[in-house]
Amino acid sequence: MKNITETVGSKNSVVILMHDAGDKILTYETLPEVINYLRNNNYKFKSLYDIL
């Protein structure tokens, strides 16, 4: 979560890559907190195809 908040900073848009694998439980556990943080800071979620 610290990485996310430091990376996002005051940027207008960001792309966040989170690894998904059987042994990457931290990603799964942190995802709700990351989503809440971004929504609370007025970020919108779009698919890659929406922004191309």
Image (cartoon, grey):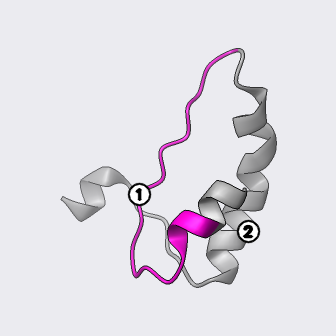
The reply to whether callout 2 and callout 1 are in contact (CB within 8 Å) is no
Q: Residue lying furthest top in this view?
A: 22
Residue 9 in picture, x, y percent from top left: 54, 77
Q: Is residue 26 above or below residue 38?
A: above
Any magenta on residue 30? no
Inspect the image, locate mark 2, and give the three-letter code of the amino acid beneath it: Asn
In the rendered image, which residue does mark 2 sit on? 36
| Amino acid type of the residue that numbered disc 1 sits on in the rendered structure | Val
Locate residue 12, reporting x and y percent: 40, 82
Q: Residue at x 39, y 73 (%)?
A: 13
Q: Quadrant of the C terminus?
A: bottom left
Q: Badge 1 local density, few (<14 within 10 Å), some, or many (20+)?
A: few
Q: Please state the extent of the stretch shown in magenta in the rendering.
A: 6-22
For residue 6, side relative to residue 30 (left or right): left
- Is 19 in the magenta? yes
For residue 15, the mark is 1
Secondary structure of the residue carrying numbered label 1: loop
Q: Is residue 4 above or below residue 11?
A: above
Residue closer to the observer: 49 or 25: 25
Secondary structure mainly formed by the magenta segment? loop
Q: Quadrant of residue 35?
A: bottom right
Q: CA distance from mark 2 to mark 1?
A: 16 Å
The residue located at (64%, 75%) in the rendering is: 39
